[in-house]
Image: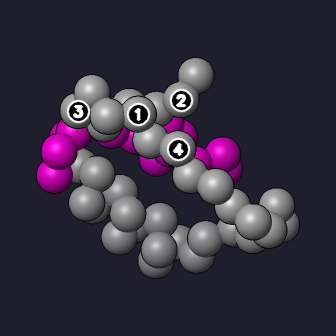
């Protein structure tokens, strides 16, 4: 299931399958997402 954000389906393409964003990057992305969808969880958008 793809996560949705306010009715918008989010699709992220990663060219390097070994890439893992830093904790700082994840926090910044989640802060922006939560401005639109306050109940969003990190697990909904990242495979951790």
Q: Secondary structure at mark 3?
A: loop
Quick one: which residue is furthest to the left in this view?
A: 35
| Res 20 visible | yes
Mark 2: few/some/many CA within 10 Å (<14, 14-19, 20+): few
Question: For the point 46% across and 77% down, which residue is it?
Answer: 24
Residue 41: in magenta span:
yes
Question: For the point 69% across and 61% down, which residue is it?
Answer: 14
Residue 46 is situated, as x and y percent measured from the top left of the image, at 57, 48
| Res 39 visible | no
Q: Which mark is residue 2?
A: 2
Mark 1: few/some/many CA within 10 Å (<14, 14-19, 20+): few
Judging by the rendered image, the residue that carries numbered circle 1 is 9
Q: Secondary structure at mark 4?
A: loop
Question: For the point 27% across and 61% down, which residue is it?
Answer: 31
Magenta residues span 35-48
Of mark 2 and mark 1, the one earlier in the sequence is: 2
Of mark 4 and mark 3, the one earlier in the sequence is: 3
**Circle 1/circle 3 CB separation < 8 Å:** no
| Marks 4/2: CA–CA distance | 7 Å
Residue 6 is situated, as x and y percent measured from the top left of the image, at 23, 32
Judging by the rendered image, the residue that carries numbered circle 4 is 11
Using the image, determine if residue 34 lies above or below residue 6: below
**Circle 2/circle 1 CB separation < 8 Å:** yes
Using the image, determine if residue 21 lies above or below residue 39: below
Mark 3: few/some/many CA within 10 Å (<14, 14-19, 20+): few
Residue 38 is situated, as x and y percent measured from the top left of the image, at 20, 41
| Marks 2/1: CA–CA distance | 7 Å
Quadrant of residue 32 within the rendered picture = bottom left
Image quadrant containing the N terminus: top right
Q: Secondary structure at mark 2?
A: loop
Q: Secondary structure at mark 1?
A: strand
């Amino acid at each position: 299931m793809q996560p949705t954000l306010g009715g918008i389906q989010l699709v992220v393409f990663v060219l390097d399958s070994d890439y893992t964003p830093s904790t700082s990057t994840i926090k910044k992305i989640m802060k922006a997402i939560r401005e639109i969808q306050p109940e969003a969880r990190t697990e909904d958008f990242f495979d951790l």
